[in-house]
Image (cartoon, rainbow, N blue to C red):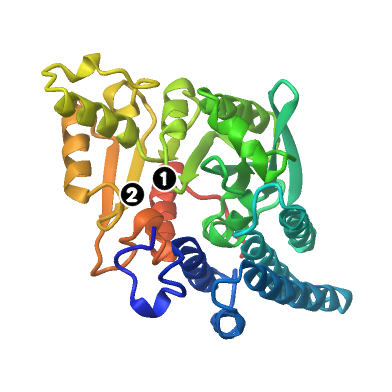
Amino acid sequence: MIPACLSDDWILCPEREDISAEFTRLLTAAQEGGATIAECLMIARQLKRGDDRSWHREWKRLAQANRQRAEAAFAEGHMASAQRNWLRAMNYYSAAAMPLEQDDERRWVAVLAMQECARRYLSARSPAGEVVTIPWLDGHALQGYFLPAPSGSARAPTVICIGEPGHRKEEFLFKLVPHARERGFSLLALDLFGDQRDDFIDALLRRRDLESAIPCVMDYLEMRSDVDFARVGIIADGWGSSFVARAVLQEPRLAAAVCDGGLWDLHERAFFASRFALSDVSIVPVPHAPLMASSADCPVLITLGEDGWLKADRARQIVQSSRLGSSDVMLKVFTAAETGAAQAHADNPSLANEYIFDWLESRLGAAARRI
């Protein structure tokens, strides 16, 4: 869905909401180093309307150009430029893959190129990041990128970043890593794919226990000597479902969480209750107990835009009626006047992430910084 608060200047193809939303994502990524506006506008002029092959071809070509610049800079010892170009190449490969079918081999080739750029970026950082594998399901492990805090080997507060099913972790490397680094946090970027292709999403969506991944991640972090395990928080990026909120109920070791707080579970329960004129909403089945309707010691921040899928007044009503005396569930609504008001803050993710990481810093504290 094209965010309602975006100007027409941002909408590349009104007849293709997926293409327009992806172009918006690329433009906003420029704020954090995941693209340049000039390159995005150049590609927009070169695209052939209604031709997905043109979209794939042009973004792939741009990705390759950035990748070549990164390798040249790395060979000459210019680590900062190499990192910047690998991040942009990674994001452009992601864009190239977007319109292709899940079983299209070109999509998988683009994903592999994106992941190779991510690995090269990790190796050029100081301290270097690493690719980690975390056991989860029988025959399927999670894969993540661990980026140590600037302090290096010292124990540091750590933030887990995980997206919704179907979302790949590479975007976090430019979208969230700078915010973590500036505050002295380590960051673990994860997705649910592991080393699987995009069509694995069908198997993930059939599962009713996605939240079981989070205790496995906590077990892994508990074993690391560079993680201050008393100060581990989690961000559910994308805000599309409640599986991280459900995980908070099962995982007492989390010190802070940014997620939907179970809003969608509660919204669905209220909808069905009103639809069938039920006076007792507790009898309406939901997959799991919503976070805000249960007891949890973990502080929770819920952020949403007033122009998103769930209207702000409805969200405020649900939060107020569901807190059951808890004062540690905080709702922040971004308005159109300040931007960040689109679904998942698509129009200005930087503003939302500044707020989110400031909130995390106030809950987790900060390690010694060396930026």
Residue 90 in percent (x, y) is at: 69, 64
Classify mark 2: helix, strand or loop: strand
- From this view, report whether residue 223 is shown above or below residue 3: above
Rendered image quadrant of residue 224? top right
- From this view, report whether residue 186 is shown above or below residue 33: above
Q: Are the two marked residues, 2 and 1, in contact with CB atoms closer than 8 angstroms? A: yes
User: Which of the numbered marks, if any, corresponds to residue 239?
Assistant: 1
Check disc 2 and give the amino acid type: Thr
Classify mark 1: helix, strand or loop: loop
Residue 101 in percent (x, y) is at: 64, 52
Most distant residue in the top direction: 283
- Residue depicted at x 38% and y 59%: 345
Q: Which residue is mark 2?
A: 303
| Most foreground residue, 89 or 261 | 89
> Badge 2: how crowded within 10 Å, few (<14), some, or many (20+)?
many
Quadrant for the N terminus in the image? bottom left
- Residue depicted at x 59% and y 79%: 48
Look at the image and tell me whether residue 113 can be seen.
yes
Residue 291 in percent (x, y) is at: 34, 27
Residue 309 in percent (x, y) is at: 30, 50
- From this view, report whether residue 59 is shown above or below residue 207: below
